[in-house]
Amino acid sequence: MVAQSSAEPLVLRRTYQATPEVVFRVWTDPEYMKQWFRPSKEFTHQFVEVDLRVGGKYRVAFEGPDGRVDTVGGEFIEITPPHKLVYSWMWEQPNEHAGIPSRVTVEFHQRDEGTELVLTHELADAEMKRRHQEGWTGALDLIPEVVIEIERAS
């Protein structure tokens, strides 16, 4: 269950020069996620686990430059490839937001210039929103490199 948010949701938009199918795959394939699903390039992954089905779980652990390891996980609520993903989101200890449930919705819209990704993260308070905005912004900024790699391989 996801707690009702008291803050306005965090909404971020990016447009990538790739089809919704490619961007959806980048978002859900653990091998591609290892390349972008982190606040910045200074973070490394200990693991990325994805069981991409409704009711399936995911867990991602990354280590920051200071050696601290943070793990986030949740359950897939809705999967409509390549248009929409909805999943729960909860940090594990020792993260300061551990145990506080939230919800992420990611939409992939076909546009003339590629795919517009709209991320909506429903968070409990303004401080969580601020911290997650920093992390998501860094992660979203890493996606173009992954998309270029896929496009070159195609």
Image (tube, rainbow, N blue to C red):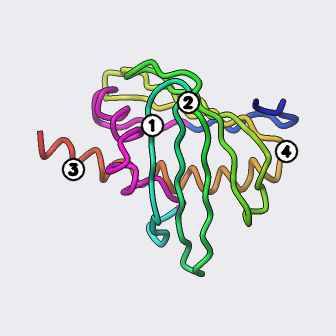
Q: Which residue is mark 1?
A: 51
Q: Find residue 76 and name its label.
A: 2
Could you tell which of marks 2 and 1 lies nearer the N-terminus?
A: 1
Q: Position of residue 20 (x, y in %)?
A: 34, 26
Q: Tell which circle, 4 or 1, labels the residue nearer the N-terminal end.
A: 1
Is residue 85 a member of the stretch shown in magenta? no
Q: Kindly identify which residue carries mark 4.
A: 125
Image position, residue 52 (x, y; %): 44, 32
Amino acid under disc 3: Glu
Pointer 3 residue: 149
Question: Which sits in the foreground, 68 or 75?
Answer: 75
**What residue is rendered at 52% in x and 24% in y?**
54
Going from N to C along the chain, the mark reached first, 4 or 3, is 4
The residue segment tinted magenta is 13-39
Question: CB atoms at circles 4 and 3 under 8 Å apart?
Answer: no
Instruction: Please name which of the two marks, 2 or 3, marks the residue nearer to the observer.
Output: 2
